[in-house]
Amino acid sequence: GGPRPASRASAMAKVTTKTGVAVGKNRGHVTTKRVIPAGYAAGKGKRNKSVQVVKDIVREVAGFQPYERRLQELLKVGKEKRALKLAKKKLGSHKRGKAKREEMANVLRSSRVK
């Protein structure tokens, strides 16, 4: 186990100062908060320009995977929920599925503009 992490709601709650008393709502030793700069890990997952260029070239040469083409068809017909279900099944998580569905919708939008 160990201690549970604080919920997001409590983390966003207003900051209160400690009273220096051992009991009560704001109990604890009075301290000054240090401002810690964002670390190296904050940049993790950011898309590099050269990586983006390579991905674009690969997409241009190889085209779409069969499930991606099916996603596009579902989106054309207007079955967003079914498209999300398919993407979730293929990619393994809700978040990835939503991102893929959005990506395919953007591809369709850009192809309509051309």
Image (spheres, grey):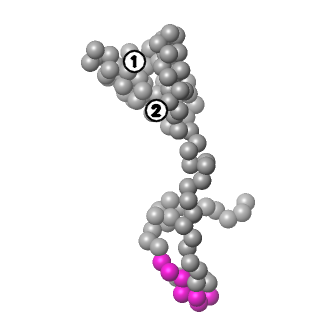
User: Does residue 31 show up magenta in the picture?
Assistant: no
Report the residue at 56% width, 55% height from top: 38
Can residue 18 be seen here? Answer: yes
Please give left or right for residue 30 compared with residue 3 in the image.
left
Q: Which residues are magenta?
A: 16-24
Report the residue at 54% width, 82% height from top: 18
- C-alpha separation, residue under disc 2 versus residue under disc 1: 14 Å
Q: Pointer 2: residues within 10 angstroms few (<14), some, or many (20+)?
A: some
The circle drawn on residue 72 is 1
- Farthest residue to the left: give it: 113
Measured from the top left, where is residue 29 in percent x and y?
A: 61, 84
Q: Amino acid at mark 1?
A: Gln
User: Does residue 23 show up magenta in the picture?
Assistant: yes
Q: Amino acid at mark 2?
A: Ala
The circle drawn on residue 99 is 2
Q: Quadrant of the N terminus?
A: bottom right
Please give left or right for residue 36 compared with residue 104 in the image.
right
Q: Earlier in the sequence, mark 2 or mark 1?
A: 1
- Farthest residue to the top: give it: 61
Measured from the top left, where is residue 110 in percent x and y?
A: 32, 20
Report the residue at 52% width, 34% height from top: 47
Q: From the viewer's side, name the closer residue of 62 and 24.
A: 62
Q: From the viewer's side, name the closer residue of 50 and 69.
A: 50
Measured from the top left, where is residue 113 in percent x and y?
A: 26, 18
Q: Quadrant of residue 6?
A: bottom right
SS of the residue under disc 2: helix
